[in-house]
Image (cartoon, rainbow, N blue to C red):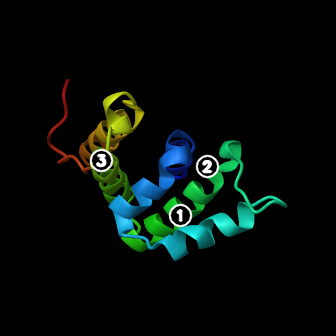
Amino acid sequence: MDFVLLTTAVEVAPRWRELAEKLAHVSKQQMEAYEAPHRDKTGMVDSEAMWKPAYDFLLTWAAQIGDSYRDVIHELHMGLDRMKNPITKRWKHLTGTLILVNCLELLRSSAFSPAPQDDFAI
């Protein structure tokens, strides 16, 4: 899940405020608080460092969603889809990750379920 959050933060870096609004209705003051530790001497956040407040927000937001990485990825995907010009249209990684996670859950439950003792193939 950390990989998904970091990758998303880097991908949406310049638009992280829009994503924060879609996911959690974050206020302007809250957004500025996420950016504050990353400001330079002039009080600006460098465009190349904008992923840092995005990642800070996503970590905090994901912790509020709960322990289910599947739920976090699903909610993140829904939030990205609600953005103007959604990046999910051109950025298929998150969609693929969501499909993979759902498939892994199904495969894990099937692969590790106890088989009846008399059901052996010869």
Q: Quadrant of residue 65?
A: bottom left
Residue on which disc 2 sits: 51
What is the CA distance from the residue labelled 2 to the residue labelled 1?
Answer: 10 Å
For label 3, the residue is 105
> With respect to residue 106, does 30 lie above or below?
below
Give the image location of residue 89, x and y in percent: 31, 31
Q: Is residue 109 left or right of residue 33?
A: left
Say which of 103 and 28 sits in front.
28
Residue to which mark 1 is pinned = 57
Between 52 and 67, the one lying in front of the other is 52
- Image quarter (top left, top right, bottom left or bottom right) of the C terminus: top left
| Residue at point 41%, 32% (across, down) | 93
Residue farthest to the right? Answer: 41
Q: Which mark is residue 76?
A: none
Q: Which of labels 3 and 2 is toward the front?
A: 2
Q: Is residue 76 above or below residue 96?
A: below
Q: Residue 33, percent across and down? A: 61, 73
Name the kind of residue labelled 3 in the image.
Answer: Glu
Report x, y in % for residue 52. 65, 54
Q: CA distance from mark 3 to mark 2?
A: 30 Å
User: Closer to the camera: disc 3 or disc 1?
Assistant: 1
Q: 107 or 18: nearer the eye?
A: 18
